[in-house]
Amino acid sequence: KKAVSTLRRSYARLLPAGARQYMQRVSRSKLLEQRGGFPSTSRPQVLRLNDQPLRWMSAEPQSEEGKEKPEEVKEEASKTPEAAPINIKGKEEIVGEEKSYGFQAETRQLLDIVTHSLYADREVFVRELVSNASDALEKARHVLLTSQGGADTEKLSISISVDAAEKMFVIVDNGLGMTKEEMMENLGTIARSGSKAFLNQLANQAGQGNDLKNSIIGKFGVGFYSAFMVSEKVQVFSRKRGEDAGHCWTSQGDGSYTIAPASGVEEGTKIVLYLRTDALDFAKEETVKTIVNKYSSFVAYPILCNGKRVNEVDALWLKPADSITTEEHTNLYRHLAKAYDAPTYTLVFRTDAPIDIKSVFYIPPINFEKFGMGKTEHGVHLYSRRVLIQAKAKDLLPEYLRWVVGVVDSEDLPLSISRENMQDQRLLSKLKDVLTKRVIRWLIDEAKKSEKDYEEFYKNFGLMLKEGVAMDQKNAPQLAKLLRYPSSAIENDEVTSLDAYVSRMREGQDTIYYLVANSYNVAVSSPYFEAFKKAGIEVLFCYNDHDEIVLANLARFGDKQLKSIEVVEPPKELIEKMEEKKEGEEKDKEEASTPSMSEDESKELTSWMKESLGKRVSDVQATERLVDSPAIISDHDNAVTRKLMRMSEFKSMGVTQPAGYKLLVNLKHPILVSLSKAKGENPELAKLVAEQLLDNAILSAGILDEAREMLPRLNEILKSVLK
């Protein structure tokens, strides 16, 4: 309790992850009695630890009343109506002769494939049986609506009971039920879909059933036989609605089945699985709940396991967007993300191209990758008619959008017969393209609504958006609108977009300039920034090495180029315009106070420096881009490339830095003016100063391998100065 209290005070936003781990440890040691699993809603949960109620993890602050009266909450929770679990063995009895029927030879082979090869994971048999039960209920609902005006539709439900001692798994629905003949047709013939036949029958009745076809899940007629993956024997008791006779279908999956009259059979269908010894995990209540929550959380009808409701979250993507409340969105997000916070942004998206899809997306408030918790798994799940097809689907959104949480549901997915993946990869690629563009446009719209809120989001997920700019050439132009950088034109604690930069560009400027530096202070004091500062040209500041890769890869934003000021000269025409604006007296005063040398002296100095520095430089040239700094280098690679070159892996591959640098010197700087004189008066000291100027320029570019190598030279210079 003390640990929880401390976490709540100190790490309120990170509490869900810690709480989840804490709960798992307590649960494993069987010290915690948990009511209904982790909450899928925002209501506070009443948990018991050492017989003490623990109120934990509410979406809203806990009220004082709730804190003072935990027993009252407990009593209130105990009043929640729940159906009583059915008798695991039931009251059904076979009362007549069992007649044996054989599957055809091809059907036996197909049954063997379904049982042993079709599905990747045995747990999907629960999904298949629940889906079949849901279809039976949907058929019953249609019958009730058309014949009885909708009476009793609210009583339709699916009930699962398990018993480890009896090694039984039982699923019951009060749906349409089957006659003996329908049992033989639907259960005795593999790959014959009763649901599909039901829809075809309605379609021939003056267009009836158009509203039903979107709710029916079954399609291939093989899902039922997945039960044999875990069962030694399967029994199906069923009675058609409106009829008195019930029957029992029995098979051990060995190529034959029996059908017999049965008494005590309720309307609907009851499937009894006698589990194999290697499948007894499916007789555990928690295991079954986990599987139902994984695959069938959004089935339209209540699903109960041993009398307790399992699916309590609505399929919001099927509802009109304007009818969904914030609380409903929060509940669904928490269910999908297994989280206890609320989403930052919410999107309900529907489209009919390339296929009809309905989807909902959420942006989480925290990026756990920032805390070193490993790579985030994809958060979007693929559904078909409310049933999970693929969890954490990697092919719906690109890798750099893996943090988006949501659901994509379609009635028209071209699924494989196991309903575990899509068959048409080209269609999947088109679907991914549509969803990616919509998510990017959604984020752009959110940024326009509130720049302040977007900046908070960007602090969490900006790095992943940059990943997209660098990796996704197709969507990079739109992703670039989401980038944010500090700038020389705004306060050092603010950021700006590329669109905002373009809106402030000077007349005639066709390039967006940026500089990679460690911090704001380093950037504004960089010699590369001097000329741009003097000309009043805005420069974006990038504090991470990867920004250079991102912007260099982007290359253009709209019709504007993106260039680093380390490798380009400032635009002379803009500098000249700024010079013209200076008042004559101020300009004359500035020129009078600036030391200078003749053209011959300038050429002589640059030639001497090139000779003195030898192979360390490729050329030494005069430049007018510097104001307060004596020298820079200009033809070097970007910061990231230089750092890669210094890595041992690249050195072992024979990749090295250029032999010489192009050194640009400011001949108006006092150091250069004095150096011009010193080369004749004190050549040894002059050479030391020239070498130090080069190292200073390399250091300012961030590419000096080892700064300690210049210490002996600095000591010699100091010694000479102090003589």
Image (spheres, rainbow, N blue to C red):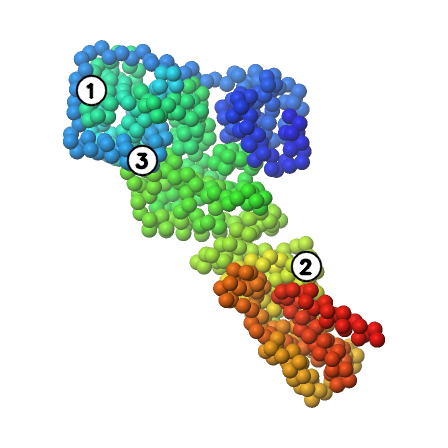
Q: Which mark is residue 258?
A: 1
Mark 2 vs mark 3, CA separation in Å: 57 Å
- Expressed as whole percent of the image width and height from the top left, the position of residue 150 reads 35, 23
Q: Residue at x 53, y 21 (%)?
A: 30
Tell me the residue that label 3 is attached to.
Answer: 119
Across and down, in percent, residue 589 comes to 79, 79
Density class for disc 3 (Cα within 10 Å; few <14, some 14-19, many ≥20) is some
- Nearer-N-terminus badge (1/3): 3
Mark carried by residue 520: 2
Mark 1 or 3: the one toward you: 3
| Horizontal side, residue 473 vs residue 89: left or right | right
Residue found 70% across the figure and 60% down from its top = 521
Q: Is residue 507 above or below residue 97?
A: below
Quadrant occupied by the C terminus: bottom right
Type of amino acid under label 2: Tyr
In terms of image quadrants, where is residue 343? top right
Task: Tell me if 670 is positioned left or right of 81 in this view.
Answer: right
Task: Using the numbered discs, state the Cα–Cα distance from disc 1 to disc 3 in whole angstroms.
Answer: 26 Å
